[in-house]
Amino acid sequence: MTMKCILVTGGVGFIGSNFIKSLLSDNYKIVNLDLLTYAASLKTLSELKRKKNFIFIKGNIGDKTKINFIFKQYKPDSVINFAGETHVDRSIDSPNEFINTNILCVFNFLNASLNYWKKNQTNKKKFKFIQVSTDEVYGSVDTGTSDENSNLSPNSPYAASKTAADHLISSYFKTYNFPSIIARSSNNYGPYQFPEKLIPLIILNALEGKILPIYGNGKHIRNWIYVEDNVNALKKIILNGKIGNIYNVGGKEEVTNISLVKKICKILDQIKPRKNKKKYEDLIKYVEDRPGHDKRYSLNSKKIKKEIKWKPRINIDEGLKLTIDWYLNNKSWWKSIRKFKYKGERLGRKLK
């Protein structure tokens, strides 16, 4: 039996690397295309490259020549696109990078995938293109929840760029019958997350005795999902997702930012007390809010639970404990990042 081959783009990043590790354990052949931007760690890549069923190619999803070569050489059965710029604060500072990567490069990649699918007579009926999107395309939700039919109302350059990509991919399904699926997940957290994002930023700042910045009043609400749960959802979507569909992938709980940070502080108080005997909560500091900061995200995930029999297993308290343990036990992974790439400075205050 031939080993199933999947092309994973952006697989050295946070969610992508967790996804690849899981698939490699399931004995898939993985071709990983990644540009190795600031958010990718060579340490993560070195761990992946130990596997014989893993092939790494450095490159951009907008590079038509390289994409066409990969399709011709490896003939993947499916494609899943994690590649993209993802941090809202950075999209405020440099929106052009988000427009280029998340829209224009996705457009080139989509066209190359469409041409490959048209010519691929061997497994044409089984081929799927999975776009990894975000709950931020729905915008801020005052009441109720966002389901797959809710209006899209992005409020940041990042969210707008992901919305545009979703529209492009949906149009290719409707126009060309291209076998695409869109997965919109809530805020992910867990191992290998670049420390510009809230949870690893708070963990590492706390360990280093730095302030724990809370935007605005701290009452912004997010729906959090542990990355392992999201990975399991994406695997089920590849196997059983219906072509042309959108699936919301939400976590178990909605939590305010300030409640989340206090949860992290309490866990650290228990397992890694400060040397000065003070509480980690003493490091919390309210700072100027992010421009256009969405107040609440809330995903309705009934569809994926019903159609594909997926549901999140890890609650926020368990997930935070697992995440904190990982960062405590993998200092070599993040210390070089904090030293050379990102020291925890504030981003997203003004346009360059």
Image (tube, helix red, strand yellow):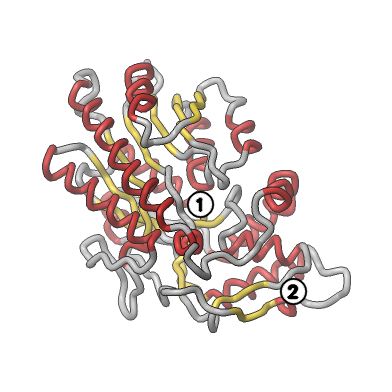
Q: Residues within 10 Å of mark 1 (few under 14, many from 20)?
A: many
Q: Residue furthest right?
A: 276
Image coords of residue 239 (percent x, y): 32, 37
Q: Residue at x 56, y 64 (%)?
A: 347
For residue 280, the mark is: 2
Q: Residue at x 32, y 24 (%)?
A: 68
Residue lying farthest to the front in this orientation: 352
Q: Nearer the viewer, residue 271 or 106?
A: 106
Vertical position of residue 241 compared to residue 135: above or below: above
Q: Say whether residue 134 is left or right of residue 116.
A: right
Given the image, on which type of amino acid does mark 1 rest? Val
Image-quadrant location for residue 235: top left
Give the percent coordinates (x, y) of residue 12: 53, 39
Residue 67 location, x and y as percent?
Answer: 36, 27
Amino acid type assigned to the residue bearing label 2 in the image: Tyr
Residue occupying the point 35% across, 41% down:
105
Q: In which quarter of the view is residue 160 placed?
A: bottom left
Mark drawn on residue 227? 1
Q: Dot 2: within a 10 Å radius of its alpha carbon, few (fewer than 14), some, or many (20 or more) residues?
A: many
Quarter of the image where the N terminus is located? top left
Q: Gap between marks 1 and 2, in whole Å? A: 25 Å
